[in-house]
Amino acid sequence: MSTTKRLPAFNLDQTPIQRLCLGGRMDIERLEKWFRNRCDGDWEHQGGITIETFDNPAWNIKVDFFDLEHNFDESISSRNIERSENDFIKFQYDPGKEVLVIFCGISNLKEAFEIFFSIDPVEVD
């Protein structure tokens, strides 16, 4: 007798990233609050955060700070992790553009954001 593993149901009102984080594997509330706290009527139109997937497979996160105060500089690359071809996190900060790019393996998204929030923290109520 075979057993079919069922995925938990998700709410269609959830954002795509919330659906990716089913089961509490990632603290999505922290990301939501980080974003909400920076929306000032200007930044969200000029800067922002983008989360994409690549076909190798990997994640690509781009944070455009555009005039926001933050705690990042070029030294963030010292936090790079390369365990294997598929288990990695790479940080790159461009001070001229005020942009942070995080490229990480398919199973490293949570860890990448944990490092991100350790540098630019936000408290969740």
Image (cartoon, rainbow, N blue to C red):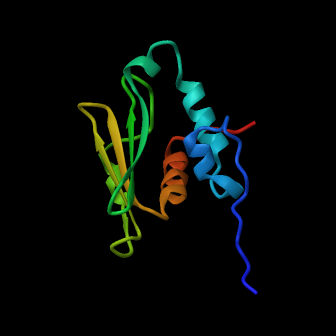
The quarter of the rendered structure image containing the C terminus is: top right
Q: Determine whether, in the image, residue 44 is placed left or right of residue 85.
A: right
Please determine whether, in this image, residue 68 is positioned above or below residue 124: above
Query: What is the x, y in percent for residue 111?
Result: 52, 59
Q: Nearer the viewer, residue 22 or 28?
A: 22
Q: Nearer the viewer, residue 86 or 41?
A: 86
Farthest residue to the front: give it. Answer: 1
Residue drawn at the location 59% of the way across and 38% of the way down: 15
Please determine whether, in this image, residue 20 is positioned above or below residue 73: below
Q: Nearer the viewer, residue 69 or 43?
A: 43
Q: Determine whether, in the image, residue 104 is placed left or right of residue 11.
A: left
The quarter of the rendered structure image containing the N terminus is: bottom right
Residue drawn at the location 32% of the way across and 36% of the way down: 99
Q: How many marks?
A: 0
Farthest residue to the left: give it. Answer: 96
Q: Quadrant of residue 30?
A: top right
Q: Quadrant of residue 64?
A: top left
Q: Nearer the viewer, residue 45 or 122?
A: 45
Query: What is the x, y in percent for residue 54?
Result: 34, 54
